[in-house]
Image (cartoon, rainbow, N blue to C red):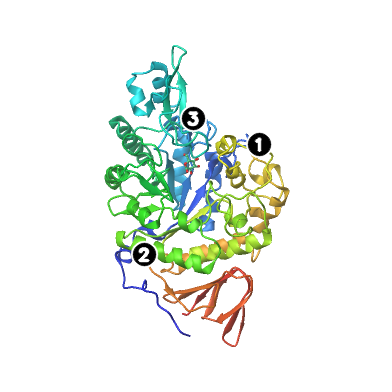
Amino acid sequence: MSQQHSALASAPTPAQAKRGDWWRDAVIYQVYPRSFADSNGDGMGDLEGIRSRLPYLRDLGVDAVWLSPFYASPQADAGYDVADYRAVDPMFGNLLDADALIRDAHELSLRIIVDLVPNHSSDQHEWFKRALREGPGSPLRDRYHFRPGKGEHGELPPNNWESIFGGPAWTRVTEPDGTPGEWYLHLFAPEQPDFNWEHPAVGDEFRSILRFWLDMGVDGFRIDVAHGMVKAEGLPDIGGDGDQLKLLGNDVMPFFDQDGVHDIYRQWRLILDEYAGERIFVAEAWTPTVARTANYVRPDELHQAFNFQYLGTHWDAEELRKVVDLTLEAMRPVGAPATWVLSNHDVTRHATRFANPAGLGTQIRTAGDRALGLRRARAATLLMLALPGSAYIYQGEELGLPDVVDLPDEVRQDPAYFRGAGQDGFRDGCRVPIPWTREGSSYGFGTGGSWLPQPAEWADLSVEAQTGVAGSTLELYRWALAVRRAEPDLGAGDSVAWLRAPEGVLAFRRGEFVCVANTTGESVTTPAYGRVLLASGEVAEVDGDAKIPADTTVWWTTA
Ligand code: GLC
């Protein structure tokens, strides 16, 4: 067996030396509170529901739980529009429920990471309401981006920026005297006005919010739109010739990934480090390259950043290998762990992405070939969990859930759908409440239906239907996480040693562990590397060779 070490295989690194840090190789499970478990039968998930299901998460074998926002909110963007950062929305419970949830999680050795939304508030936030009420010249307007319009009567937006959800990024207000007045900036929905991070009160407020939740005992924060917050000086038009413009993808974006945002994180890190217990920050930073993402996880800034380049990669050995190499290379100099993620509440679930032809992006509304999608999804998960670093799992992927692509329009809630950003509400399809039981109202999600309808086929994908069933996707995840825990080096380190493999096959060694992923539609023959620990499909071994079926990943140990 010939072994091809990549340039990446290297001596122990600072990352390995600091192996005590739980988050460096943690598997973190994302709970979307509306859709996880409903304790009071109102069709909407809640904190008490989550608390009741913590033993499930412990048994699944994850290290931490990240909760999408549950704060007081009018829900214009499913809670990413926060009206009060220190209160729980009554829809989800109250602060006592949050306290009980954090305590119970800790009893079960699970950590809790909460979402922090600092780029914008809700338009129902006290500051914004006052800013509107008090009219032009109100000091509260300086905490957001209010500007007079262009044109003879101020009837045109102050610049040409567009909302991520479609339409202009500016909305004109009606002043207290009833006249059309200033405009305010919202990179997302009009109900989500952007804070002005140049104003000292904004920074003070968020440092205080951090302390509030740290005092409540949370183990960390996922920072929403972490690449936002700071805007280029003067809010210049996109496509202008200003030197201060930064690149995002191929577009010039003066509102994302500005260098000034790093000063905020350096201040936040000092606060976090005052608290015991290795608490962490993870950035939702959409940047053009993994190298730019690495800037967010320099030693005095955040701990982790989502690897969206990995999430967007096709089920293709060459492309996967390239992004794994680029990621590890980018993270090594800053000493941060790589992260791996396949699904979240903003993209089409990977079981559906991989069911469709490559190249359609992460927002897909066709079911495609479901069996193929599931086979690849299972294989992709075993590959992800074999890589060094930390991995994120989105609720329901352990059941092999696809996106629900045929939701009736009248149940949709995603603001992107209503603002028609060419996205057509794709995000509701990955937010459908998860099935716990074969029968019952909403398949055990709650006793009073569910806020988005679940397909009947989900009975057979429920936790109940898959528990204890050899080969089920749920049991595959449980085994994978158990093996990951038992193999002390699986998530550690910052390199992989690539092995020679047939075209379309990805193979690497990590000490005594070998992972082989066949991304092709045909079965392939590779050496049998040792004892099979786990496989996402049936592997046949004959005379020292292994026959790996199409779209299948295998874990071996040579020990
Ligand atoms: C992030 C969230 C997304 C939300 C947006 C605005 O991208 O993940 O759900 O709509 O920020 O807060």
Pointers 2 and 3 in contact (CB under 8 A)? no
Is 456 rendered above or below residue 93? Answer: below
* x and y, in percent, of residue 83 in the image: 45, 29
- Which kind of residue does numbered mark 3 sit on? Glu
Report the residue marked by disc 1: 411
Q: Secondary structure beneath disc 2?
A: helix
- Disc ID at residue 191: 3
Q: Residue at x 60, y 40 (%)?
A: 38
Give the CA separation, mark 1 to mark 2: 44 Å
Residue at 35% x, 32% y: name it. Answer: 196
Mark 2 vs mark 3: which is more N-terminal?
3
* Residue under the point 42% across and 27% down: 184
| Residue at the image position 49 percent from the left and 40 percent from the top | 164
**Helix, strand or loop for disc 3:** loop
- In the image shown, does 127 or 231 lie closer to the viewer? 231
Query: Can residue 8 be seen by looking at this rendering?
Result: yes
Instruction: For label 2, count other residues whose C-alpha is less than 10 Å away and answer few (under 14), some (14-19) or many (20+).
Output: some
Judged left or right of residue 143, residue 480 is right
Query: Does residue 488 appear left or right of residue 270 in this picture?
Result: right
Instruction: Residue 329: give its label.
Output: 2
For badge 1, the amino acid type reads: Val
Mark 2 Cβ and ligand 1 under 8 Å apart? no
Label 1 with label 3: CB-CB less than 8 Å: no
- The type of residue carrying mark 2 is Glu
The quarter of the picture where residue 254 lies is: top left
- Is residue 295 placed above or below 525 in the rendered structure? above
Cα–Cα span, label 2 and label 3: 40 Å
Instruction: Choose the circle earlier in sequence order: 1 or 3.
Output: 3
Separation of disc 1 and disc 3 at Cα? 20 Å
Helix, strand or loop at disc 1? Answer: helix
282 on left or right of 551: left
